[in-house]
Amino acid sequence: MNYGMKEQDKISTSKVKRAAKLISTGAKLGGNYVKYYAKSAVGDKEAAREQLDKDNAEDVYNSLSQLKGSALKVAQVMSMDKNMLPKAMVDKFTLAQYSAPPLSYPLVVKTFRQYFSKTPTELFDKFSKSAVNAASIGQVHEAFLDGKKLAVKVQYPGIAESVHSDLAMVKPIAMKMMGLKEKEVRIYFEEVESKLLEETDYELELKQSIEISEASADLDGVHFPKYYSELSSKRVLTMDWLEGMHLDQFLSTNPSQETRNKAGQYLWDMYDYHINNLLKIHADPHPGNFLFDKDGNIGVIDFGCVKEVPEGFYRNYFQLLNPEHFNNKEKLMKLFYYLEFIYETDTEEAKEFFYKLFKESLYLITLPFTVDEFDFADEDYFTKIYAMGEQISKSKDVRKNGAARGSKHTLYINRAYFGLFAILNKLQAKVNTNCSFEF
Amino acid sequence: MENEVRDINIKTVLQNEYILHLLRNGKEPVTVFSFCEELKIDENDFYSNFNSFKLLEASIWKLLFNQTIEAINQDEEFPTYTAQDKVLSFFYTIVEVFKQNRSFIVLKLGNLSCKDLRPKALSEFRPLFNEWIKDVISKGLETEEIATRPLITDKYNEVLWGQFLYILRVWINDESRDFQTTDAAIEKTSALLFELMKKGPLDLMIDFVKFAYQNKAY
């Protein structure tokens, strides 16, 4: 354990420091944007604020799930780091995003020839000439083989090559939006670039998907498509066709409270199982990656973003949930050092300040874990989180203490859990929030 | 019969050796005589197939074109394709065929300027392309995928020739993995051109201007 070793390749050392982002775990809406909204949309009324925060979070989630390609990644990584992108930002990304027309069928044929030396119709019994759906960096075709309905994802050509220049296009917008300097944004963009390049590798996604879906086969209420390696390649990914509704569609059928609780519980248990048993996490929990049926069963698609969590980090991170640690200053301080929330090199004053700050915010964030059952319909809880995030982002003390805080594993876990919380909130689900971590 | 087979073989040998000579020396052989001496064949064997290096080269371009069409026709679905998909198929296939002979093509067309719409090297290739593309266009006109416009319709083949030259230039300079930039160029230019060739705002605009002018309604 290297206390006080500052991790050098930070994702961000932005003006609003990591501390702020970390603490608010996906909750912070930049004060300006909230003000902008309050003024422009509903008038400068405090009462409107609560509703606004909620609407904002919902809108952001909706629009994030509609973004494509590089813009999507920028928004994702930024929202991971800034925790939550205000709607106004996402809208700008939507404008900036590169909207490629669908791939022509001859190009699909060519891609198949290149990797399988066969055309789609030679490989499958039936293959839809036009795409049925757009994925973030490709499109989905419907196919049949031996009576089975399949989803075939085909990647746009030149995605990997265009990543760099695409990002260069989005960069000025991002800088302006966030009020950051080139030097400060660069770190985001390097992270985005490497993530995006990783996601353009369908072979990697295939491997991750097979591993995680096989390991999750016994989970209740969630099912995964079967992936076909012999029908997949670097730019083609074939899996079972999953039936189901997207979150919004599902909610529009007015599912009963019982069904919504069930769906929420399945999701919760899946995350719990993945992190505690596989040390892996589906780090991209945006609503588009889950399909619901009328009974609340869930289909999970898209494993382009699976994060592996190092064991040592995992052990220490979840100790935060341990009341024995949480209420013992010495022990909690030790954890904070390990997780790089606080550095040995900080001044005594700063140490004390951050200790209080992190403890307070962790209390709020880990609240669902500390009770047996948590009602995610509790708007009061979400409002508190938003308020805290905003308060922190405005705090001069946080900004003054330069170094970025929290290792990047924390970021991914927080992003995943905040994503999960947001979905559960949309579901208005009451969930049995047990955690299989053993202290 | 036997003679014919031999002729074909000699033809192929001459084509191959000519390309090899070009690639090794960067220029064509000084004379037919020296070329034949190099190959240890009779000069007559050359002249009974080609009258000059120029014609030999033309035959190579024709061969590349025919290989492309042959490959396209192997796709049973091809006749059912829209004009746009036919053109896309053609371009995707021809860059594959060209890939087998990339060094030769880069040597011949490496300096292709965007202003040069009639590259000398392609003088024998162009009529073949034109003939094929005109056929595709006329089928597209029949199905109304492509709009009939006075004066302009006859120039569509020229436009697609321009597209071909553009794609060729992109391909020659393409340094991306698997020539993915070329693929994107093919997608995008085709999408754009066919969008412009079909009935659309342009026609409505002309129609309106015509109306305004004829009726002095302005």
Image (cartoon, rainbow, N blue to C red):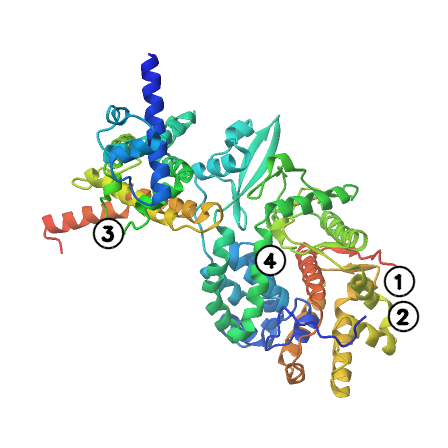
Residue at numbered disc 3:
B115
Q: Which quadrant of the view contains residue A423?
A: bottom right
Does residue A390 lie above or below A103 as drawn?
A: below
Amino acid type, label 2 = Glu
Instruction: Work out whether mark 2 precedes mark 1 in sequence or the reverse, and give the earlier one.
Output: 2
Residue at numbered disc 2:
A324
Q: Residues within 10 Å of mark 2 (few under 14, many from 20)?
A: few
Mark in the foreground, 4 or 3: 3
Residue at numbered disc 1:
A439
Marks 1/3 in contact by CB < 8 Å: the verdict is no
Mark in the foreground, 1 or 3: 3
**Visible in this render: residue A135?**
yes
Q: Which quadrant of the view contains residue B200?
A: top left
Q: Quadrant of the C terminus of chain A?
A: bottom right
Mark in the foreground, 1 or 4: 4
Q: Quadrant of the N terminus of chain A?
A: bottom right
* Badge 1: chain ID: A
Q: Residues within 10 Å of mark 3 (few under 14, many from 20)?
A: few
Amino acid type, label 1 = Phe
Residue closest to the eye, A181 or A372: A181
- Looking at the image, the residue that sits furthest to the top is B1
Residue closest to the eye, B115 or A254: B115
- Marker disc for residue A288: none
**Spatial distance from mark 2 to mark 3, Cα to Cα?**
77 Å
Residue at numbered disc 4:
A195
Instruction: Work out whether mark 1 precedes mark 4 in sequence or the reverse, and give the earlier one.
Output: 4
Marks 2/1 in contact by CB < 8 Å: the verdict is yes
Marks 4/2 in contact by CB < 8 Å: the verdict is no
Instruction: Work out whether mark 4 precedes mark 2 in sequence or the reverse, and give the earlier one.
Output: 4
**Spatial distance from mark 1 to mark 3, Cα to Cα?**
74 Å
Q: Are marks 4 and 3 on the same chain?
A: no
Query: Residue A8: x, y in percent?
Result: 67, 72
